[in-house]
Structures are given as structure tokens and as C-alpha cells.
Amino acid sequence: MPVSTRILALLTILCAVTVGCSSTETAGDTAAPTPSTEAAPASSPTGDDPSPSCEAPGRYADYSAAAVADECYTDTILFFHAPWCPECRGFEEAIKSGEVPDGAQILKVDYDSATDLRKQHEVTIQSTFVRVDPAGERVKLWSGYGKDKSVDAILENTK
């Protein structure tokens, strides 16, 4: 076989391989997620922990039923807050300047508009904190009005 025929055959094979790889990469890019976009496994690598494998940094956020049901948070405390209340503003400042521990969340509930939630948890005054379970049922109620304004006080008094 002459050299030019061998070179042409080699170039043809090289071109076919290159085109085949190129189309496979394109199909792969659209058909399957890349490793960086895949979700983390649902359980711990050892399988010892039956709880969901998620890291939940402590947070202070607005109330929602979905936030209460978030399985990554083991401690959920509702903060019945009124913007016109100086006690509430003091607690809010303490929460924002403090540190809510990992796995805990404090959810701000609008005292004035959440009348059904207030009735459900028997909240009669703003600056009240209610620890709830994942189903949203009351575990412990604490009225912080006139009390120590700190994240630690909130967590300790709602155990």
C-alpha cells in the first residue's frame, strides 16, 4: 500500500473517532448530569445514621409550613414577632447578632396577621417563642417579654 493511501486511511480513522467522540460528548452533556450537579447521597456513607444526610446551618427566617417540616432541622422555634413591639425588636437584634446553632431554626411569625397560628399555639402576647415538632405541633411555649434577650435564652427556655 502506498504511503499516501496509508496516511489517507489513518486520517479517515482519526476523523471518524474524533467525530464519534464529539457527538458522544454532546449527547452526554445534555442527557446526563455531570458529577458536579448530582445530588448528595440520601444517607450517610456508613449507613449508621437513619436521619437524612444534610447539614443544616442555624438560621433565622420568615415562617412557612415548609420550613417547619424541613427534616434537616432538629430544633424549630416560632418567634411571634410584631414590628411595633420594642421587646420583639430587641429579640430580633439579639438573634441577628448572635449565632443560631447548626440544626436549629428560629422562624419569625407575624404576630398581627397569623391569628390562626396564634390560636393554635395559645399565644397571647408578642415576644412569645414556641418550640414545635416537624408536624408543627407545640412542644413548649415561652413568653420572652421582659426576659434575657439572647439566642441562648430562647433555646434554653423552649427545651
Image (cartoon, grey):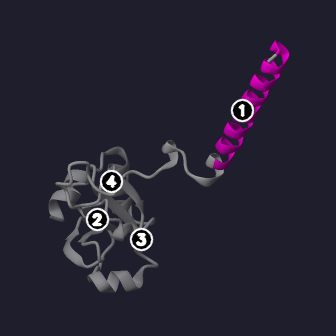
N-terminal of the two: label 3 or label 1? 1
Mark carried by residue 66 = 3
Of tags 2 and 4, the one toward the viewer is 4
Circle 3/circle 1 CB separation < 8 Å = no
Of tags 3 and 1, the one toward the viewer is 1
The secondary element bearing badge 1 is classed as helix
**Label 2, on which residue?**
76
- Amino acid at the residue labelled 2: Thr
Of tags 1 and 4, the one toward the viewer is 1
**Label 1, on which residue?**
18
* Name of the residue lying farthest toward the front: 1
N-terminal of the two: label 1 or label 2? 1
Circle 1/circle 2 CB separation < 8 Å = no
Tell me: 3 left or right of 81. Answer: right
Question: How many numbered tags mark residues here?
Answer: 4
Asked if residue 152 can be seen in this view, the reply is yes
The secondary element bearing badge 4 is classed as loop
Between the C-alphas of marks 1 and 2, the distance is 56 Å
Q: Which residue appears at 28% of the width and 50% of the height?
A: 102
The residue lying toward the viewer, choosing from 65 and 22, is 22
- Amino acid at the residue labelled 4: Cys
Give the main secondary structure, helix, strand or loop, of the magenta stretch: helix
The magenta segment: 2-27
**Label 4, on which residue?**
54
Circle 1/circle 4 CB separation < 8 Å = no
Q: Position of residue 131 (x, y in %)?
A: 24, 69
Tell me: 24 left or right of 73. Answer: right
Between the C-alphas of marks 2 and 3, the distance is 12 Å
Between the C-alphas of marks 3 and 1, the distance is 49 Å
Q: Position of residue 26 (x, y in %)?
A: 69, 44
Dot 3, how many residues are within 10 Å of its Cα: few (below 14), some (14-19), or many (20+)?
A: few
